[in-house]
């Protein structure tokens, strides 16, 4: 039987050629904005000029400049991807569709995590085969990171990485119909930093009409820096580079130097008279906003958006277990947290530390976001609690940050996720859990209903995924 020709799609910017396989069609490295180079790294995303002829969309794109990251003995390569792959045209999307046939299928747009400094849509975890198999068009987005993406600079727009996500959503609105997607049925979903960006979309008036549903996985509705906190990061970065704290001074600095000074930003005290560090020192970058997204929902499109939101039950294990900090934490380390010891008398010091860090980073902000959305949206909120415990690192990793992702993307069976030092550990994934989680996400994208009751702030139960009974929080 003769080989089918590679599919070609006409877009407003030009034609692209993809690949067809058993799960559908893939189109990679499609630019949604012009390359951010030089001073353009500190400007809003600009329209791409387009191209003549047919653009090859069969190879992955470059990635945003980013440092290498290590999580001790845990191999997180499937999460972080290849790291920095240099190239100017990294403001791009990948599209995985059942067929670019003019159909009007649900569209899901994924915003990756990585602490605002790392990650890309090239990460192995974000393969869209299962979504295309199930009749959903998946779009995965790259955006600016680190200093170009999130350092707050005078005379430069704030939150440039978030502006990139807006530009990608406008590309989806204007282009996705050519790939068999419905621009009137778009779900934005993100994890970790990507989830925090998704929460900001809900609170931003300019997002009205760009999407109809949102999923926030392990984000923080109260994770933004205040302008005062952001200034501290900017001043430290400028001092490390030996330049003034302005966009004009930063513009000629090469990306390699930006990456080289990132260690100088670690451990910066961001506590102020009015705010704590919402990221507990884990990243020197976040959104910079005068009001937290959870407190600003009424000013954006949130009241008309269906929301699925949740956390994992042992989020902070990711930051402690691979470094053996779960066992080495002592009671002395926690003397200032004696009240919490009363509430959790059976926890080891490490488990208590993990619980407190997880609450600070994810759970408290998630609870505020869920309650605020439920109040303004008339009950269009669903909440989950992911409870399955990975057996990685001698069974200690547990229901840590990122463990839900293989189940969302329905690739938990892949061997590259299974070994003692890999994300899901040596044990096989529970039968049916990936089908249930992935099925809930795609059902939500179609109808706004993942298959369980809506969230009620008066009786705040979260649907348990991979565990026991309902969790109340």
Image (cartoon, rainbow, N blue to C red):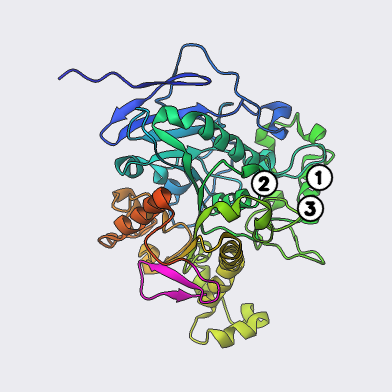
Of helix, strand and loop, which mostly describes the magenta segment? Answer: loop
Up-down relation of residue 287 to residue 81 (above or below): below
Q: Secondary structure at mark 2?
A: helix
Task: State whether residue 413 is above or below residue 83.
Answer: below
x 75%, y 60%: residue = 270
Which residue is denoted by mark 1 in the rendering?
239
459 in the magenta segment? yes
For the residue carrying disc 3, how many other residues have a C-alpha within 10 Å: few (<14), some (14-19), or many (20+)?
Answer: some
Q: Which residue is mark 2?
A: 205
Say which of 123 and 71 sits in front.
Answer: 123
- On the image, the x and y values in percent for residue 32 come to 55, 29
| Magenta residues (range) | 455-473
Q: Are marks 2 and 3 in contact (CB under 8 Å)?
A: no
The answer to whether residue 253 shows anywhere in this view is: yes
Circle nearer the viewer, 1 or 2: 2
As for residue 231 lying within the magenta part, the answer is no
> Where does residue 137 sit, x and y in percent of width and height?
39, 38
Q: CA distance from mark 2 to mark 3?
A: 20 Å
- Residue 101 shows which numbered tag? none
Q: Secondary structure at mark 1?
A: helix
Residue with the mark numbered 3: 227
């Amino acid at each position: 039987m003769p080989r089918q020709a590679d599919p070609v799609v006409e877009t407003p910017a030009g034609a692209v050629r993809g690949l067809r396989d058993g799960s559908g069609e893939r189109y990679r490295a499609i630019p949604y904005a012009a390359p951010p180079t030089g001073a353009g790294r500190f400007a809003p995303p600009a329209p791409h000029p387009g191209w003549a002829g047919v653009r090859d969309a069969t190879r992955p794109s470059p990635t945003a400049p980013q440092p290498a990251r290590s999580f001790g003995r845990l191999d997180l390569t499937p999460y972080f991807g290849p790291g920095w792959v240099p190239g100017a045209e990294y403001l791009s999307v990948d599209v995985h569709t059942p067929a670019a046939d003019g159909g009007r299928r649900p569209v899901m747009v994924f915003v990756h995590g990585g602490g605002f400094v790392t990650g890309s849509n090239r990460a192995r975890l974000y393969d869209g085969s299962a979504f295309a198999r199930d009749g959903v068009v998946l779009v995965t987005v790259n955006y600016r990171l680190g200093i170009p993406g999130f350092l707050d600079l005078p005379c430069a727009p704030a939150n440039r990485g978030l502006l990139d996500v807006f530009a990608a959503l406008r590309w989806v609105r204007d282009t996705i119909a050519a790939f068999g997607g419905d621009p009137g049925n778009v779900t934005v979903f993100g994890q970790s930093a990507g989830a925090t960006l998704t929460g900001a979309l809900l609170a931003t008036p300019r997002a009205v009409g760009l999407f109809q549903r949102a999923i926030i996985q392990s984000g923080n509705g109260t994770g933004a820096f205040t302008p005062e906190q952001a200034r501290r990061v900017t001043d430290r970065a400028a001092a490390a580079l030996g330049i003034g704290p302005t966009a004009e001074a930063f513009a000629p600095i090469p990306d390699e130097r930006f990456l080289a000074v990132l260690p100088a930003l670690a451990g910066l005290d961001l506590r102020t008279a009015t705010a704590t560090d919402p990221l507990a020192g884990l990243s020197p970058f976040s959104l910079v906003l005068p009001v937290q997204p959870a407190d600003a929902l009424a000013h954006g499109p949130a009241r008309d958006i269906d929301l699925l939101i949740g956390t994992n039950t042992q989020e902070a294990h990711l930051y402690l277990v691979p470094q053996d900090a779960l066992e080495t934490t002592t009671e002395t380390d926690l003397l200032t947290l004696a009240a919490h010891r009363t509430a959790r008398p059976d926890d080891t010091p490490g488990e208590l530390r993990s619980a407190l860090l997880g609450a600070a980073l994810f759970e408290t902000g998630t609870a505020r976001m869920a309650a605020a959305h439920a109040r303004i949206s008339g009950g269009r909120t669903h909440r989950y609690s992911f409870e399955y415990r990975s057996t990685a690192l001698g069974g200690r990793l547990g229901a840590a940050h990122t463990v839900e992702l293989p189940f969302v993307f329905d690739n938990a069976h892949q061997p590259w996720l299974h070994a003692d030092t890999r994300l899901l550990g040596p044990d096989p994934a529970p039968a049916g859990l990936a089908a249930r989680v992935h099925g809930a996400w795609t059902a939500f994208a179609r109808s706004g209903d993942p298959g369980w009751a809506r969230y009620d702030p008066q009786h705040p139960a979260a649907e348990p995924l991979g565990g026991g009974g309902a969790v109340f929080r």
